């Protein structure tokens, strides 16, 4: 929401703080790199620093009509001003004048705006007066030339230097340096700003007095004008608004605190509050990056920020824009909460329990007078909607009310009531907490028998753990009984909050607990397969058992290999991943830094990298629960060394992998951390101590479930970290290894999925098992791992899978005892053949004989075992008859290939004594042969002939009536075929090979 300018209770809007839409486009690192290549004098990182501190790297667009007072708005990714309303410096016009790029062009194109800014910087740096400056002095002078903040008095000078200080903070931040690819700086800020001014600028809180800015420790900003110390909030810097911008409360008691969002920068808010023409003021302003607080109006005076509520409220502005959650940092939340707690302890009678703790919204939402700490949008007669949809009110409530004394219950079972007991009503302004933590319990179950609270105002919150910092199971209000609540660990926390309004009869509940078993035995997993050999998709039985505490999770992974000498890999499109680094690194892309495989491990040996990135594609979705496992060891002993892995990445090429999570291990400080990344901006969500030793391998397991939103981290099978995401990521396309300031090794990276008792496993090209067995060596692998409810992990077990989906291949199928013959002269009909099967191997052959391909009229099918030839004695051979052999070859997997010979004609000795008439079809030529299976040609046809085409099994594929078939269209698959031509009493069989 925007700052309100109050004069006679009329609301205007602060110029920096117009409601601005944020585009979704984030500039990639390469966009800035090209600027520095074109303008090499500009300090690398300065353009990013200016954009980040003014807009958080999101382009701003005017989307709201101008206010009636013609207040200007900044624009673009840099937050420039082309209309300053005779107060702010119109830096856009100066940049346009120096760069030659018009303001209109800058507004129309973010690239042109950046180019104009960088070109202006280059021109200013090249000026002779700036030639001998250090880099830090150059940056200071650039800000002096390009900032929108006027320097007309001590307060404005402080506001200006505060913005410069933020630029230096950005350039010295290692994560920002890694993210945007500029060298991390180490400026001597005390030299740049002076010792005393540095102490004020870096202070957590300041106070603004007339012509004087002072830190909480008494350091005075060097303005050489006398001053007094603030009487209100000791930690704040004091930079007073002029008398023209506030007034007396005229005896009205302070009874509320109003939360605002600046819709602009911290320094801009301070400067605007010093502008008499603004007719706006606020008691405090809080900086996003570190939570620094500046006081501008004494609490005893009336600031002009919330219309008719000004006389009784204290206004707190928070740097940023309501549409971009990145401004609402943990540092800002904590600093603001500390300030509000101080206000509630200052004798005004403001109860911290009357902090709004409900749902955020993007519109006005009038709340009753019971709530005393709430947003601008919650007051009557307002058009403002700050702090908006991205302000986390439940989190803010807990930070303000972080001190509580719970009632700890250790009995195995019992009953619970609100403060009114079994028969009475609860009271107003209550916040009571019960921790149900029975001795030696494994879990707790809570059942409500009565529930009656003021709907939407009084509520019961239940947490899955031993404090209000545990994952929230649910919030319940009204008269509907909550469901039965079951914890996933040995404790449940129940919190009750009521406002100052109506009280009700409240609630009654009973609880029971399940005793903790002394279970130190891990689960047992097994895989059952339906067959010894698999020729098509099959259902595998996957079972994990644990008779003591029961199985909590069971996971499986499917992989395959092309032969016994090659590594095993999973098909990543199915959500599985396997990497043991026994082959090449083809699964990985080195985005930043150079990871290399050596001695079976994946190593990053460049400790100068602050954000290394080797990523691999992996499909991840919201339907699955995933287990990520890997081994890592940090092999250096540097300061601030850290390493870990991202998962559920949306864009692994970005600095923080787009949207993702990552688990990080900081060796120097012995910390494990869980981070969430949204729009490539990361936030640390959980941190816990852990002992980490350089050059020691650690096995890491991370469980993530979209359905629960839980991330659970184990190191060497010990639980070390958990975090619950209320808005869990639903999909990702990759995983990514990350390190900073260290050398590190990774090994044995697997991604498993949770399973049912039976899972369909697909085989074939681009399936889960992509390869067939090689020389009867297994090609498929199903790997399982499980954990029981006592956090005992099983070792991984692996079941091999034999796969063959291809029948044997015929090398030859000949008439005669050796090479193929076309005729024979005795009653001995001979056939020989040869096949191969590189997967499951040939098991046996079958043979039949007949007078056409596939025909068994002479000899029915008979088993030949592994023989590859056969002689059959014809009892009554018929002169001129063509005989065919038909062979079936069956492999160990049960797949059969069939081939027929092209036939051999029997010629009797008696008939051979007479001259045999020549075959008029003998001169016919078939081409091309081998063939592509689409068309064939016949040459030298003496007359019209009939045509029949048989496959290897003797099946008639094509038949044509007698004609001059010089060109025949066909459509057949690869294989061996027999083409039979006949006409005028003659017949000719030709073999056709299709490849």
Image: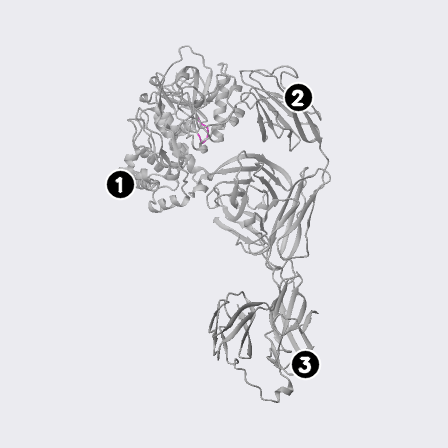
Q: Could you say which quadrant of the image residue 481 lies in?
A: top right
Secondary structure state at the residue bearing disc 2: strand
Q: Could you say which quadrant of the image residue 99 lies in?
A: top left
Secondary structure state at the residue bearing disc 3: loop
Above/below status of 595 relative to 625: below
Q: How is the image coloured?
A: one colour
Instruction: For marks 1 and 2, give the CA distance.
Output: 74 Å
Find residue 827 and name its label: 3
Q: Is residue 214 left or right of residue 546?
A: left
Question: Residue 825, position in %: x, y?
Answer: 64, 83
For disc 1, the neighbor class at 10 Å (few under 14, some 14 to 19, many from 20) is few
User: Could one spot residue 513 in this view of the protein?
Assistant: yes
Majority secondary structure of the magenta segment? loop
Secondary structure state at the residue bearing disc 1: loop
Per the image, the residue denoted by label 2 is 416
Q: Is residue 67 magenta?
A: no
Per the image, the residue denoted by label 1 is 100
Question: Residue 469, position in %: x, y?
Answer: 58, 29
| Foreground tag (3 vs 1) | 3
Of residues 719 and 787, the one nearer the viewer is 787
Question: Residue 653, position in %: x, y?
Answer: 46, 46
| Foreground tag (3 vs 2) | 3
Instruction: For marks 3 and 2, give the CA distance.
Output: 101 Å
Instruction: For marks 3 and 1, give the CA distance.
Output: 102 Å
Q: Earlier in the sequence, mark 1 or mark 2?
A: 1
Q: Which residues are magenta?
A: 288-292
Q: Earlier in the sequence, mark 3 or mark 2?
A: 2
For disc 2, the neighbor class at 10 Å (few under 14, some 14 to 19, many from 20) is many
Of residues 189 and 411, the one nearer the viewer is 411
Q: Is residue 289 magenta?
A: yes
Which part of the image, by quadrant, shows the N terminus? top left
Question: Residue 118, position in %: x, y?
Answer: 33, 41
């Amino acid at each position: 929401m925007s700052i309100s300018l109050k004069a006679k209770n009329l609301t205007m809007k602060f110029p920096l703080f117009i409601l601005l839409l944020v585009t979704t486009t984030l500039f990639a690192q390469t966009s800035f790199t090209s600027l520095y290549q074109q303008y090499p004098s500009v300090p690398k990182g300065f353009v990013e620093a200016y954009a980040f501190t003014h807009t958080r790297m999101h382009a701003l667009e005017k989307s709201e009509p101008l206010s009636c007072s013609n207040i200007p708005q900044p624009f673009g990714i840099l937050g420039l001003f082309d209309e300053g309303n005779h107060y702010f410096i119109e830096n856009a016009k100066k940049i346009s004048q120096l760069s030659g790029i018009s303001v209109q062009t800058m507004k129309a194109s973010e690239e042109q705006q950046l180019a104009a800014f960088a070109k202006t910087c280059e021109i200013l740096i090249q000026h002779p007066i700036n030639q001998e400056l250090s880099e830090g002095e150059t940056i200071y002078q650039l800000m002096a030339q390009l900032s929108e903040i006027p320097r007309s008095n001590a307060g404005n000078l402080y506001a200006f230097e505060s913005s410069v200080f933020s630029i230096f903070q950005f350039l010295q931040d290692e994560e920002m340096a890694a993210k945007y690819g500029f060298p991390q700086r180490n400026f001597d800020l005390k030299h740049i700003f002076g010792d005393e001014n540095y102490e004020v600028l870096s202070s957590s809180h300041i106070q603004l007095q007339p012509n004087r800015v002072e830190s909480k420790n008494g350091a005075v900003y060097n303005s050489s004008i006398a001053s007094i110390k603030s009487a209100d909030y000791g930690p704040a810097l004091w930079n007073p608004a002029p008398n023209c911008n506030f007034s007396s409360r005229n005896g009205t008691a302070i009874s509320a605190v109003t939360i605002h969002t600046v819709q602009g920068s911290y320094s801009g808010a301070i400067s605007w509050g010093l502008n008499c023409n603004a007719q706006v003021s606020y008691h405090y302003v809080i900086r996003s990056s570190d939570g620094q607080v500046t006081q501008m109006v004494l609490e005893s005076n009336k600031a002009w920020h919330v219309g008719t509520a000004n006389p009784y409220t204290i206004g707190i502005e928070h740097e940023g824009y309501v549409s971009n959650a990145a401004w609402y940092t943990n540092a800002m939340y904590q600093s603001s909460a500390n300030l509000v707690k101080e206000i509630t302890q200052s004798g005004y009678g403001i109860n911290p329990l009357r902090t709004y703790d409900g749902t955020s919204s993007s519109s006005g939402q009038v709340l009753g007078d019971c709530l005393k700490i709430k947003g601008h949008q919650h007051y009557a007669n307002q058009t403002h909607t700050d702090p908006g949809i991205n302000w986390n009110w439940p989190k803010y409530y807990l930070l303000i009310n972080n001190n509580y004394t719970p009632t700890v219950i250790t009995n195995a079972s019992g009953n619970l009531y609100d403060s009114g007991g079994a028969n009475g009503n609860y009271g107003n302004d209550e916040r009571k907490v019960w921790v149900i933590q029975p001795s030696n319990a494994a879990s707790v179950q809570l059942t409500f028998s009565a529930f009656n609270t003021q709907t939407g105002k009084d509520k019961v919150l239940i947490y899955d753990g031993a404090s209000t910092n545990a994952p929230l199971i649910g919030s319940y209000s009204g008269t509907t009984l909550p469901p039965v609540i079951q914890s996933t660990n040995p404790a449940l926390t129940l919190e009750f909050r009521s406002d100052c309004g109506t009280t009700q009869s409240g609630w009654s509940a009973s609880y029971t607990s399940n005793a903790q078993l002394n279970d130190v035995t891990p689960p047992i997993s097994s895989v059952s397969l339906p067959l010894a050999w698999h020729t098509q998709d099959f259902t595998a039985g996957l079972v994990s058992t644990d008779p003591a505490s029961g199985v909590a999770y069971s996971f499986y992974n499917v992989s395959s290999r092309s032969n016994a000498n090659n590594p095993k890999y999973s098909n990543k499109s199915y959500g599985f991943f396997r990497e043991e680094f026994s082959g090449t690194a083809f699964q990985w892309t080195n985005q930043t830094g150079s990871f290399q495989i050596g001695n079976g491990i994946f190593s990053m040996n460049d400790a100068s990298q602050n954000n290394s990135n080797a990523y691999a594609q992996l499909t991840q979705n919201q339907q699955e629960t995933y287990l990520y496992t890997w081994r890592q060891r940090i092999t250096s002993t540097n300061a601030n060394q850290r390493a870990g892995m991202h998962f559920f990445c949306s864009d692994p090429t970005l600095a923080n992998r787009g949207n993702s999570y990552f688990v990080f291990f900081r060796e120097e400080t012995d910390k494990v951390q869980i981070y969430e990344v949204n729009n490539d901006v990361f936030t640390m969500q959980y941190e816990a101590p852990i002992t980490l030793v350089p050059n020691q391998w650690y096995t890491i397991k991370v469980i993530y479930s979209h359905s629960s939103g839980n991330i659970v981290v184990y190191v060497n099978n010990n639980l070390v970290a958990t975090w619950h995401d209320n808005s869990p990521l639903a999909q990702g396309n990759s995983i990514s290894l990350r390190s900073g300031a260290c050398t590190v090794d990774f090994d044995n990276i697997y991604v498993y999925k949770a399973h049912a008792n039976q899972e369909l496993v697909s085989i074939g090209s681009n399936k889960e098992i992509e390869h067939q067995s090689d020389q009867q060596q297994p090609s498929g692998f199903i790997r399982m791992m499980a954990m029981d409810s006592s956090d005992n992990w099983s070792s991984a077990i692996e079941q091999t899978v034999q796969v063959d989906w291809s029948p044997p291949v015929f090398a030859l199928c000949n008439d005669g005892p050796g090479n193929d013959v076309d005729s024979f002269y005795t009653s001995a009909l001979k056939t020989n053949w040869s096949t191969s099967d590189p997967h499951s191997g040939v098991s046996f052959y079958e043979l039949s004989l007949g007078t056409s391909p596939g025909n068994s009229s002479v000899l029915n099918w008979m088993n030949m075992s592994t023989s590859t030839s056969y002689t059959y004695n014809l009892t009554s051979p018929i002169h001129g008859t063509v005989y065919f052999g038909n062979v079936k070859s069956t492999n160990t997997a049960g797949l059969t290939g069939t081939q027929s010979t092209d036939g051999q004609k029997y010629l009797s000795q008696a008939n051979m004594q007479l001259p045999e008439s020549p075959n008029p079809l003998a001169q016919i030529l078939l081409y091309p042969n081998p063939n592509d299976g689409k068309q064939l040609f016949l040459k030298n046809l003496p007359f019209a002939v009939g045509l029949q085409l048989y496959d290897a099994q003797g099946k008639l594929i094509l038949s044509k009536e007698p004609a001059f078939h010089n060109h025949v269209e066909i459509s057949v698959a690869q294989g061996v075929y027999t083409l039979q031509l006949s006409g005028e009493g003659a017949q000719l069989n030709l073999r056709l090979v299709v490849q």
